[in-house]
C-alpha cells in the first residue's frame, strides 16, 4: 500500500513544493494551511491534493485535524512539520506578542503536529518525521531572536525523537533551508533582501523545489539509517 504524508503549511511556498514532490514520488498527500483559502483552493485545483485548515499552534485542533486526515486517507507514515511564520524585530523592540506567536506556531506547532501521529508510527513500526528548520536556527539572525530560538529548537527535537524512534523504525530529521524565494522572504524589505543575497556565495535565493528534493529523500524508505541529522541547503551561506 502506498504511503500517506501530511505536510503542514503545504499549500504555499516551500510546503507547496514538498507536497507536489511527495505526490510525484507516489505518496498520498494531505496539505494543511492556516487561513489563506484562496491559495489552498488554487493549490488543490492544480494538484488534486486535499487541503485541511487548522492552526498548528492549537493542540486540540491539530489532533482533530490529524484524526480527520487519517479517517480520509489512512494512517500517516510521513509527517513534514513545515508551517512557520516570522515576526521580525530587533530584540529591544520585540513585543511579547511577537515572541509568543512565533514560539506557538513554529515550536509548539511541531509538537502539536508530530505528537498525535507518533503513537501510530510506533505501533506500525514505521515513520518519517521531517522538520523544516532554518539556516537562522543554526547561526542566529539580527531581528530574529524569536524565530532563531524555534528553529534551533527544531534541531533538538529531531535529535531526541531520533533516539526514541530508532528501534521502532521511525526516523526524525531536519532540513535547514537558507533563504528561499517564497512570500516569507519577499516580505523582507527589498534593500535588506538584496544585502542578504549578496552574502550568499551562490549569488541567488534558493528555489522551493531544492528543499522539496531534500525532504523527498528523508521521507523515503531508503533513508532509514539517517536519523537525527540535518541537511543544510543554503547556497554555501553558512557551514555548521
Ligand atoms: N546586522 C547588523 N545591523 C543591522 C542588521 C544586521 N543584519 N540589520 C539591520 N541592522 C541595523 C540597521 O542598519 C539599523 O542601524 P541604525 O539604527 O544604525 O540605522 C538598525 O540595525 C535597525 O534599524 P531599525 O531600528 O530601523 O530596525 P527596524 O525596527 O525597522 O527593523 C528589520 C528592521 C525588521 C530588522 C528589517 O531590517 C528586516 O526585516 N531585516 C531582515 C531580517 C531577516 O533576515 N529576516 C529573515 C526573514 S526570512 C526567514 O526568516 C526565512 C529563513 O528562515 C531564512
Ligand atoms: P510561506 O510561503 O509564508 O508559507 C507558509 C505556509 O504555512 C502557508 O501554507 C501557511 O498557511 C502555513 N501556516 C502559517 N502559519 C500557520 C499556522 N499557524 N497553522 C497552519 N499553517 C500555517 O512560508 P515558507 O517560506 O514556505 O516557509 C515554510 C517553512 O520553511 C517555515 O517553517 C519557514 O520558517 C521555513 N523556512 C523558510 C525559509 C525561506 O527562506 N522561505 C528559509 C528557511 C526556513 P496560509 O497559506 O493559510 O497562510
Image (cartoon, rainbow, N blue to C red):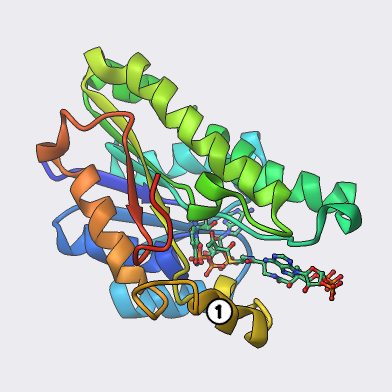
In this rendering, does residue 210 appear at all?
Answer: yes
Percent position (x, y) of residue 222? 9, 39
Q: Quadrant of the C terminus?
A: top left
37 relative position to 100: left or right: left
Q: Which quarter of the frame holds ligand 1?
A: bottom right
Q: Secondary structure at mark 1?
A: helix
Look at mark 1 in the image and give the residue it sits on.
Answer: 38
Quadrant of the snapshot with the N terminus: top left
Residue 109's place in the image compared with 84, above or below, is above
For the residue pair 150 and 28, the one nearer the viewer reads as 150
- x and y, in percent, of residue 236 in the image: 35, 63
Q: Is residue 113 visible?
A: no
Residue drawn 28% across and 67% down? 210
- Left or right, 157 with respect to 105, comes to left
Most foreground residue, 97 or 6:
97
Task: Please tell me whether residue 10 is drawn above or below residue 164 in the rendered image.
Answer: below
Quarter of the rendering containing residue 233 = bottom left
Give x and y (percent) for residue 220: 16, 44
Res 51 quadrant in image = bottom left
Amino acid at each position: 500500500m502506498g504511503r500517506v504524508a501530511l505536510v503542514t503549511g503545504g499549500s504555499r511556498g516551500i510546503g507547496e513544493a514538498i507536497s507536489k514532490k511527495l505526490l510525484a514520488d507516489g505518496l498520498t498527500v494531505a496539505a494543511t494551511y492556516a487561513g489563506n483559502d484562496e491559495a489552498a483552493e488554487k493549490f488543490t485545483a492544480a494538484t488534486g491534493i486535499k487541503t485541511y485548515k487548522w492552526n498548528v499552534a492549537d493542540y486540540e485542533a491539530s489532533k482533530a485535524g490529524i484524526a480527520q486526515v487519517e479517517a480520509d486517507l489512512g494512517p500517516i507514515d510521513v509527517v513534514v512539520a513545515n508551517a512557520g511564520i516570522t515576526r521580525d524585530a530587533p530584540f529591544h523592540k520585540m513585543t511579547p506578542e511577537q515572541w509568543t506567536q512565533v514560539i506557538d506556531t513554529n515550536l509548539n506547532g511541531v509538537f502539536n503536529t508530530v505528537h498525535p501521529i507518533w503513537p501510530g508510527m510506533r505501533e506500525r513500526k514505521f515513520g518519517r518525521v521531517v522538520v523544516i528548520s532554518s539556516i537562522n536556527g543554526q547561526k542566529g539572525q539580527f531581528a530574529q531572536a524569536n524565530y532563531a530560538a524555534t528553529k534551533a529548537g527544531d534541531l533538538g527535537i529531531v535529535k531526541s525523537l531520533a533516539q526514541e524512534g530508532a528501534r521502532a523504525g521511525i526516523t526524525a530529521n531536519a532540513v535547514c533551508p537558507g533563504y528561499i524565494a517564497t512570500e516569507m522572504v519577499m516580505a523582507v524589505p527589498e534593500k535588506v533582501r538584496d544585502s542578504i543575497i549578496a552574502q550568499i556565495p551562490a549569488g541567488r535565493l534558493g528555489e522551493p523545489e531544492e528543499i522539496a528534493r531534500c525532504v523527498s529523500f528523508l521521507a523515503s524508505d531508503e533513508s532509514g539509517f539517517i536519523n537525527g541529522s540535518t541537511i543544510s541547503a543554503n547556497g554555501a551561506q553558512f557551514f555548521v
